[in-house]
Image (cartoon, rainbow, N blue to C red):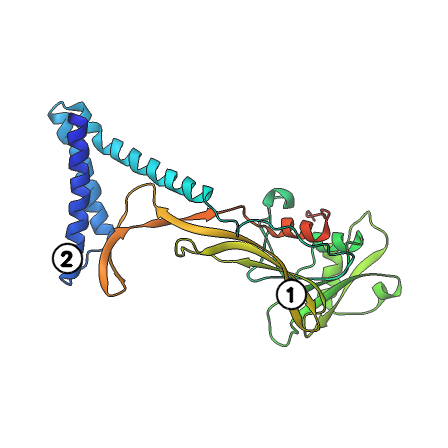
């Protein structure tokens, strides 16, 4: 009986805090989330103290039991959402691409990669032709690899990288290209180099666009990391596949009351939510493996 009484008191206290927050908001005196949650958890702490004074051990355990049940429901709801992920989420098989002459890559804000494959690096600059780029060119996976140009004034939109040898490697070019040669040179490789040239537009070929969205979004909305594969021809793009994650929301493992937040036509009190990603994260390295049908070298 003591545990049940304590749980009822805990739930009543939570509802009272929410009702008080809502009433004050409607009266034009909104409470900050920090204040209302300090009041709520201070009340929870008072219940075990009262239980210990009364020697009612089960009542003293009621807040801990309530919080444990809340956390279990939160995690259970998250697992249920992930299990119900729709068929539109997930990796789709790419159509046969054949021999790829030109591959272009884009990823606003960087290319997220699996740190286990790169020696601890989780994001690559989208304009740098590092080890993965040189490996793809030297292994003959692709003839031309096109990246977005480094942000800055007076730069063209893209830069095309190719494998070269002989006189092409000895020719004078920009300092930026010389740095790229030094970064991508393999000490055990044949005497060749990676050359580059600026381009105004995206060339024909296969285009891989890595999309990264962050932040809490509405339940059921698509979000997070995705990989979009297209074929570029004569300035147009045809989608080949789109690997997407989904997103849903559930409450935090601990109750956190939000108050003083306007929503629609009124102000309501509710609980802080958390993102529940649906599906596998799509890193750039996995998407590139799918395009090239073989892994490349990721460590410098």
Q: Mark 1, mark 2: which one is toward the viewer?
A: 1
> To which quarter of the image does residue 196 belong?
bottom right
Please tell me which residue is depicted at 65% across the width and 68% down the height of the picture: 237
- The residue labelled by disc 2 is 24
Q: How many marks?
A: 2
Residue 171 location (% of width, % of height): 84, 68
The residues bearing labels 1 and 2 have C-alpha atoms spaced at a distance of: 55 Å
Please tell me which residue is depicted at 41% across the width and 41% down the height of the picture: 80
Q: Residue furthest front?
A: 87
Position above or below: 1 against 13? above
Residue 72 location (% of width, % of height): 34, 35
> To which quarter of the image does residue 205 belong?
bottom right
Q: Residue furthest left?
A: 54
> To which quarter of the image does residue 15 belong?
top left
- The residue labelled by disc 1 is 238
Please tell me which residue is depicted at 78% across the width and 70% down the height of the picture: 173
Q: Residues within 10 Å of mark 1 (few under 14, many from 20)?
A: few
Horizontal side of residue 189 vs 234, given as left or right: right
Residue 8 location (% of width, % of height): 17, 35
Q: Earlier in the sequence, mark 1 or mark 2?
A: 2
Horizontal side of residue 165 vs 117, given as left or right: right
SS class, disc 2: helix
Q: Residue furthest bottom?
A: 154
SS class, disc 1: strand
Residue 54 visible in rendering:
yes
Nearer to the camera, 179 or 166: 166
Marks 1 & 2, CB-CB < 8 Å contact? no
């Amino acid at each position: 009986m003591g545990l049940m009484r304590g749980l009822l008191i805990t739930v009543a206290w939570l509802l009272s805090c929410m009702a008080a927050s809502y009433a004050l908001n409607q009266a034009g005196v909104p409470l900050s989330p920090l204040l209302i949650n300090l009041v709520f958890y201070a009340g929870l702490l008072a219940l075990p103290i009262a239980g210990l004074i009364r020697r009612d051990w089960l009542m003293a355990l009621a807040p801990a039991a309530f919080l444990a049940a809340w956390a279990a429901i939160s995690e259970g709801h998250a697992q249920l959402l992930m299990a119900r992920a729709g068929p539109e989420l997930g990796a789709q098989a790419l159509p046969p691409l054949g021999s790829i002459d030109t591959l272009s890559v884009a990823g606003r804000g960087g290319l997220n990669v699996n740190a286990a494959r790169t020696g601890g690096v989780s994001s690559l600059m989208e304009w740098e032709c590092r080890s993965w780029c040189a490996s793809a060119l030297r292994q003959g996976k692709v003839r031309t690899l096109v990246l977005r140009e480094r942000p800055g004034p007076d730069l063209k939109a893209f830069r095309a990288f190719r494998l070269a040898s002989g006189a092409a490697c000895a020719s004078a070019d920009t300092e930026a290209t010389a740095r790229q040669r030094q970064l991508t040179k393999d000490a055990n490789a044949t005497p060749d180099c990676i050359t580059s040239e600026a381009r105004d537009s995206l060339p024909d070929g296969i285009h891989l666009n890595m999309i990264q969205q962050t932040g809490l979004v509405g339940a059921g909305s698509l979000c997070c990391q995705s990989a979009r594969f297209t074929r570029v021809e004569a300035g147009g793009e045809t989608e080949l596949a789109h690997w997407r994650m989904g997103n849903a929301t559930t409450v935090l493992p601990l109750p956190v009351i939000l108050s003083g937040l306007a929503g629609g036509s009124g102000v309501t009190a509710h609980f802080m939510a958390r993102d529940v990603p649906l599906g596998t994260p799509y890193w750039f390295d996995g998407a590139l493996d799918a395009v090239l049908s073989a892994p490349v070298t990721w460590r410098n």
